[in-house]
Every structure is written in C-alpha cells, then in structure tokens.
Amino acid sequence: MTSERNNRLLNAKLNKYIVPGIMMSLALQLGNIVDTIFVSNLIGVEAMSAVTMSLPVETIVQLTGYCLGIGGSIAVGNMLGKRDKESASKLFSVTFLVTLLVGLVFSVCAFPLAGPIARLLVPGGGALADYTGDYIRVSMLGAPVIGIGLMMVNYLGVENHPELASAYLIIANVINLILDYIFLRFTPLGITGASLSTVLGFLLAMFVFLLYIRSDKRNIRFVRLKAKDFGVLREAVITGVPMLVFMATNFIKALGLNTIIINQIGEEGMAVFTVCDNVLLIVEMLTGGIIGVIPNVAGILFGEKDYVGIRVLCNKMLKYSYIVLAVIFAVIMAFTEQITILFGSGGGELGRQMVDALRIFAICVMPYLWNKFIVSYYETIEETAIASFVTFLENAVVVLPATFAGILIWKQIDGIGIDGIAIGFVATELITVIAAWIFRKIKHKNSSFYIVPDKNPGTNLDFSIKSTMEEAQAVPVKIMEFCKKNGVSGNKANLAAVCAEEMTVNIIKFGGKTSNWIDINLCLEDDLCRLRIRDNGVNFNPLEYSHDSDEFDIHGIELVKKISRSMDYIRTIDMNNTIISF
C-alpha cells in the first residue's frame, strides 16, 4: 500500500488512450496530406495549390461537426463526471441532429454555389479556379457525412471507446488512399476524384459506429427529444467556443493567407506554402493525438474535482508530445529535400525555395505545440476566455500581418519573398506564447499555470492499494486513523471504513484479471464525508446489482447501500468510479 495515490492506475489508462489518440489524429489529418500528394504527383502542382485554396470552404463544412463534437464531448465528460447521464444523452442526441441538418443545408447549396465561391477564392479565375470549384463542390455535397463522422469520433473518445474512434478514421483514410489512386490514375474525374474519395471514405467506414451503438459500455444513448431539450445545446456551444473561434479564425487565416501569397508572390508561393502547411499537418497528426487525450480525460477528472489527476495527465501528455516533436524536427531538418520531392517539387529553383522555406518553417512547430496544449487544456477546465484568446490571436490577429510583413521584408533581401512566409509563421507562434502568458497573469494574478488548485478540495486521504486481500485488510485501519486525526465522528468513521473494506474486497474478488490497482479517496468537505473508489476491473455497476446466484453473491453491496447517505457510479476512462457519501 502507498501512503499517497501512486497514479499507476490513471497512468495505465492514459497509455491506453495515447495510441488510439495518435492513430485518430493521424487518420484525421492524413486525408488532406494524401490528397495533396496524389494530386501534385498525378495532376500537377497547380492542382495541388487548389486543395489549399479550398481550405476556407473545407473549414466551414467541418465547422458544425467539429465544434459540436468537441464542445459536446467535453460537456458530456463533465456531466458524466457529475453522474448526470440523462443530460449527457440529451446533449448527444441534440448535437447529432443539429450536425445532420446543417450538413444537409450545405448539400443543397453545393451545385449553385461551388463555382461562384471558387471564383471569389481565386483572383483572376483560370484553371486554378476550376480545380478549386470541382474540389469544394463534392466536399459540400458530402457535408452531412463529414459532419457526423467528426462529431462521433469525439464522443467515442469520452465514451471509453478511443480505439473505435481511431479505427473509424483509419478505415476511412485507407479507403480514401485506395480510391484516390484509382480515381486519379484510372478515371477522368481529376481533382473531383480526390474530394470524392475523402467523402466516400468517411461514409463507408461508418459501419464502425454500429459497434459503439451495440456496446453495453455506453453511458449515453439516443433519446426522444422535446422542444425544450434543445436548450441543452448551449452547454456544447459554450464549451466549444474555443473550437468555434478556432474554426472561424482558421477560415479567416486560410482566406487571408491565400490572398496575400497569391497577390504578393503568385502560384509558386502558393505551392511552397502548401508544402509547409502539409508538414504542419504531419506535426498535428503525430502530436495532436497525444494532446487530444486531454479533453477526453481531463473533462471527466475536472467534473470529479480530481485536480491532482489533471496535473498527472497534463505533465504526461506534454512529456510525450515534446519527445515526439523532437524526433519530427530532426527528420524535417535531415530530409528536407526528400520531403519537398514527395509533394511534387520536381527540384529546380522552386524545389530549392521549398527546401529553404521549410527549414525556417520547422522552427515554429515547437511553440505551435505549446499553443495547442494551452487551448486544449484551458477549454477543458472551462477557462474558455484564455483558450479563445490564444486561438484568435494565433489564427487571425497575428498570422496575417506577420506573414504580410515577412514577405515584404524578405522581398527586400532576395527579391522573391517566399522565405518570408516561414518567418511570419515563426513570429506568430512566439508572439502568441508570450501574449497568452501575459493574458493569464492578468486574468488569474496569483495562480499557477494550471489555474486549478494544487490539491483536491476539502481534507483528503488519497492512496492506492494493490488488488490483494492483504492490502485490503489495511484499508479500514488507514481510514479510521485519518478520521480520528481530523475529528470525524466515530459513527461516520466506522461507516466509511466498512464501506471501503466491502467495496475493495469485492473488487479484488470479482474485478477480473485486469484489476491490479485500486485508488481510494476519502474527502471531508463541510459536514459531508465522501468516499471515491476507482478501479480498472471488469465493468460493474453496484447500483444495478441484485443477488442472482450463489456463484456471484456480493453480500457487501447491499450493506453499503443501506448504511450510506447516497451512492453513485459511472464507468469513465474505462474505469469503475464509485462515490459513496455519508
């Protein structure tokens, strides 16, 4: 037994989320990268630039699914942390319906609006405008599929199914990869085929969602909605404000950068920027999955007021992220030329400019990762003002003037200005890091970076035991000593000790092979005594248990129910979480 919580149980579950998180992020970004590589090599660099020119519309198409998916899943995580399954189910159902309806509106508008939008995005029209129109038309038609897909993967993460979320996106992108090659190589579809393959990948992979719907581990379900139930959408919108700001500013960023680069440098500058932007997607692909564990897990921990667990989570995710980032940075610097060739540079003067710009651009990935972590963490602990400030600053306020100034300054040096694009991005990320630190200091003058308290609220006994009978026997002794030291009445102390012993013994007996550690927390807050027990055994809800056979007879559960004031249970982060109050 440890005198304090050893966090091995939480760490083990975080490790379970990291790999699916990376795979999910990898699959989510891979579609754009694959499209760009295939289009550049099989159609041409001009068509590759059209994919980047389409990004403002792609952002709008994804807006509802992404924002309601992330905002809704974080809000649902907080609700589940508070044991409110009914509200969580209503929010899930509302966000699903709204995402579907908005996607259908985009589909209806696809044919009449795609062409005019493309001509607005590409000054002067020409082949680049035609390519852009063809690409975004199919994306708009597939908006319902893309929106629902993006929404669902976020809910799967908070619902103990990160592996299904990553499986969905991996399958979707494998299909996309195969269809990209078939459509672009063997059909006359051209760039339309690249966009169509993405939509079909998202659609055909949806059979994975059936596995979730049939799962007995679900905490949230589709429910029949009444008009008043749509008010719960406010929770997803409020929590998703940073993501909404991100998507809105991403639209402004994409549109503004495309306009600046086309007008100041031309199509060669657009090709260089496309390569740099796709390298940033690769960084996002590998590190974003690690950072993405934070909203899936921290929302639940925040709802439970487990601030110690939140710090363990963040420290671990940051450590892993920067290890991965160091490897990526080394690869970029060592194989810069090969990376540009992969994106169809073809060598020559354009290839040389791509290599120079990419090496400068690589510097921005370090502060970029920190800014991404800030947004993900602060929106999870409901500090949306800081998260929104960072997002707005990084994607709208700083990046456009910094890039414009970088191009103008670099034009004075080499007469071209392409390296100025990379300089602008490096300056943007560094300025955002500094401004975010100042903003937090102003808003929370005496707080640390994490803002939440160093310790959980109340007076706490927080410790871990191995799943063995020997250690379980010491649990009531430890609890009695703690209660006596803190002036808890003998009656409450006995109740807490008995409940803790009964619950831990039952976990050890019936938890299965996966149960190896048990976290126990006894919190004294005002006149309330609250016992929380967390284990990674088989899925078991003590509230639903009733005696059904002599082979599986858990006598202590009924005793605990009788002597406690209240008893709550939820399965979150793939762990049993039981809270007993006295």
Image: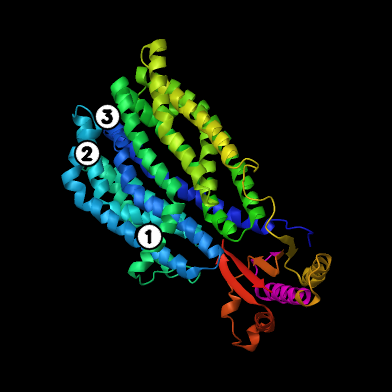
Magenta residues? 493-520
Name the residue carrying label 1.
95
Say which quarter of the image contains residue 39.
top left
Is 262 within the magenta? no
Crowding at dot 2, Cα within 10 Å, few <14 / some 14-19 / many 20+, comes out as some
Main SS, magenta region, reads helix
Find residue 33 and report its horizontal and vertical position in percent. 38, 39
- Of helix, strand and loop, which one carries label 1? helix
Find residue 142 and report its horizontal and vertical position in percent. 27, 51
Q: CA distance from mark 3 to mark 1?
A: 38 Å
Say which quarter of the image contains residue 131.
top left
In the visual, does 53 lie left or right of 355? left
At label 3, the amino acid type is: Glu
- Location of the C terminus by quadrant is bottom right
Given this view, does label 3 or label 2 mark the residue nearer the observer?
2
Q: Which mark is residue 46?
A: 3
Name the residue carrying label 2.
117
